[in-house]
């Protein structure tokens, strides 16, 4: 993983915790990617939409086109961060 990818991942995880009721300090770095957005971090569909919109605005990328797919397929922070990172990289590549 390159330096840019690591920084993006850190930013995404920080934002996930900023919009959560849970504190990041409650979890070890090794465990964070395995946490469930809905069970562990108490996200619901509204908070997930808020999170996605904040990423869309910051990174100029479309993320909310398939909410049901996101909710059904991306349970853990690791899966979610990977999905969002790929969308951001794809959008940046297209703009180049």
Image (cartoon, grey):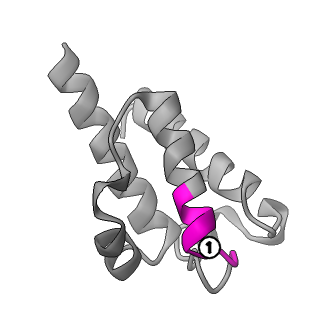
Residue 48 position, x and y percent, is: 55, 64
Tally the marks: 1
Q: Is 75 in the magenta?
A: no
Question: Residue shown at 59%/67% (left/top)?
Answer: 46
Q: Position of residue 20 (x, y in %)?
A: 74, 64
User: At x 83% / y 71%, what residue is drawn?
Assistant: 26
Nearest the eye: 24 or 94:
94
Q: Quadrant of the N terminus?
A: top left
- Residue 33, percent from left and from top: 53, 67
Q: Secondary structure at mark 1?
A: helix
Seen from the viewer's position, the closer of residues 11 and 64 is 64
The part of the image, by quadrant, that contains residue 40 is bottom right
Quarter occupied by residue 90: top left
Relative side of 69 to 30, left or right:
left
Magenta range is 41-49
Q: Which residue is mark 1?
A: 31
Q: Quadrant of the C terminus?
A: top left
**Residue 12 position (above or below residue 91):** below
**Which residue, as the protein is rendered here, is positioned at the far top?**
96
Residue at 45%, 78% in the rendered image: 75
Q: Is residue 64 left or right of residue 6?
A: left
For label 1, count other residues whose C-alpha is less than 10 Å away and answer few (under 14), some (14-19) or many (20+).
few
Residue placed most toward the observer, 81 or 32: 81
Residue 53 pos. (x, y %): 51, 45
Is residue 95 placed above or below 32 in the rendered structure?
above
Q: Is 43 inside the magenta-drawn segment?
A: yes
Furthest-bottom residue in this view: 39
The quarter of the picture where residue 22 lies is bottom right
* Point 69% across, 78% down: residue: 42
């Amino acid at each position: 993983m390159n330096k840019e990818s690591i920084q993006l991942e850190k930013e995404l995880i920080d934002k996930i915790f900023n919009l959560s009721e849970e504190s990041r300090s409650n979890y070890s770095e090794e465990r964070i990617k395995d946490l469930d957005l809905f069970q562990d971090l108490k996200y619901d569909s509204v908070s997930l939409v808020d999170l996605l919109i904040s990423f869309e605005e910051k990174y100029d990328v479309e993320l909310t086109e398939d909410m049901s797919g996101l909710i059904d397929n991306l349970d853990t922070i690791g899966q979610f961060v990977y999905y969002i990172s790929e969308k951001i990289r794809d959008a940046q590549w297209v703009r180049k």
